[in-house]
Amino acid sequence: MNQSDIWSGQFNLKTVFATMFRVSLGLGAIVFMIVTLIGLLGAVDAGYDAVNHFRIFIVAPGLVMALLALLIRARTTAAITMTALFVHAFAIVPEVYAGWRAPQVAVEPAKTPHRFKLVTFNMAFRHTNAERLRRFLENEKPDVLVLQEVSGKAVKIVDGLADLMPYRVHCMNERICDLALLSRHPITWQEIRRPSRAGLRLGLDPNRTRLIRAMIDIGKLTGNAGQTINVLTTHLGWPLPHVRQESQFRQLVQIISATDADRTILAGDFNSTPWSYAMKKFDRSLPMLRITRALHSWPTKLSISGVSMPYPVLPIDHVFIGRHFHAENVRRGPYLGSDHYPVIAELALSE
C-alpha cells in the first residue's frame, strides 16, 4: 500500500464520520420538531400539554443542534431547529420579559400606604431545615405564610413557629391535604377542602382540589377596624394525568369567582409552568393577576442524586392577587432545605 492509498483511506474515513454526523444531527432536528409539534397540540388536547411544562429542557438541546447545524452549514437542519426554537420562544419570551419588567413597575406610596407580605413555600415533608426557616421568617416578617407538603417532621417545625405566627389553619400530616396557613393577624373565618383518597387515586372525586381558605383581619395593619382579606393556598397534582389538574384548575376558578376576588390572594404549588396551555387558560379564566412571572422556584436539588442545581428551572410556585392589591416586589427566597425555594410577595393594599 503506497502513501497515496493511506491518505485516501483517511480522507474517506473523515467523509464517513462527517456524513454520519450530519445525518444524526438531521434526525435529532426532526425529533426536536416532532416534540415541538406535540406540544402545540396541547392547545386543542390537554393530554399533549405536559410536554410544554418542560420547554426549558427541550430548548437546550435544540439550541445546541441549531448552533452545530449553522457551524457545519447544514441549512435544512438549521432551518428545522430554528423554526422549532421560534415556536418555543413565542411561548417563553413574553413570560421572561414580564418577569424582567415587573420589578420596575413602582406603586405610588401615597395611594397605597399599607403593606402586606406573603410567603408561599413547599416544605417537601421532612427536608426543610427548621433553623433556616425560622431565621428566614424572623428576617422577612411575613404577614401570612402558606405551606404545602406539611407532614411528618414538617409538622413539628410548623408547631415551633407559633410564637412568630400565632394564628393558623391547617390539615397537616394528611397526605391527601398537607397544607397550612399561618398568620400574624387574627383569622375570622376558615375552610378546608380535602379530596377523598379514592377520588385522588381514580380521578373521580369532584372535590379533589386540596385547599385552605381563610379570612384575615388586617384591621390593626390598616387602621380600619374589621377590614379583612381572603387568602387561599392550594397544592395541585402533577400535569399527568391531565384530567386531574384540569379539574383542579376549573374548581379553583369556580371557588374564586364565588368570593370577593378583588380582596383575595391565591398562592401555592401549582405544579404548572406559565408557558403551558393549562396555566395560560387559568390566567385568562381567573379574575385575578398572576404576579410570579418567570420566577423559577424548583428544583433546589435533584431529588435522585442530591446534587445541587446551579439554578432552578421550573416556575411552578405562584401567587395571584385581586385588584385590591398591587405587587411591589416579588422574589425568590433562600434555600431552606426543601426542593422548592420560597416565594416572597410584597404587596401594597389599596384604600
Image: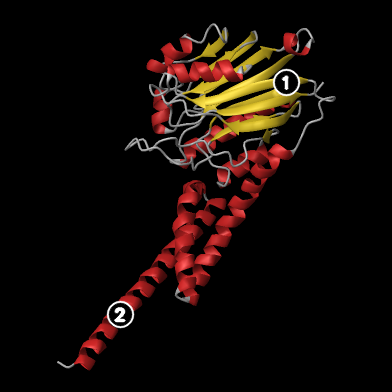
Q: Is residue 207 visible?
A: no
**Kind of residue at badge 2:** Lys
Question: Where residue 13 sits: x, y (%)?
Answer: 26, 81
- Residue at numbered disc 2: 14
**Kind of residue at badge 1:** Arg
Question: Where residue 274 sits: x, y (%)?
Answer: 58, 43
Q: Which mark is residue 200?
A: none
Which residue is at the front of the view, 278 or 332?
Answer: 332
- Categorize mark 2 by other alpha carbons within 10 Å: few (<14), some (14-19), many (20+): few
Report the Cα–Cα distance between label 1 and label 2: 67 Å
Quadrant showing the N terminus:
bottom left
Front position among marks 1 and 2: 2
Quarter occupied by residue 320: top right
Horizontal side of 313 relative to 5 (left or right) equals: right
Instruction: Examine the rendered structure and indicate whether residue 131 appears above or below residue 21.
Output: above
Q: Which mark is residue 115?
A: 1
Give the SS element for disc 1: strand
First in sequence: mark 1 or mark 2? 2
Residue farthest to the right, as pictured: 110
Question: Where residue 325 sits: x, y (%)?
Answer: 74, 27
Residue at the (64%, 32%) spot, across then down: 330
Instruction: Examine the rendered structure and indicate whether residue 313 appears above or below residue 68.
Output: above
Which residue is at the front of the view, 195 or 330?
Answer: 330
Q: Is residue 204 visible?
A: yes
Horizontal side of 1 relative to 270 (left or right) equals: left
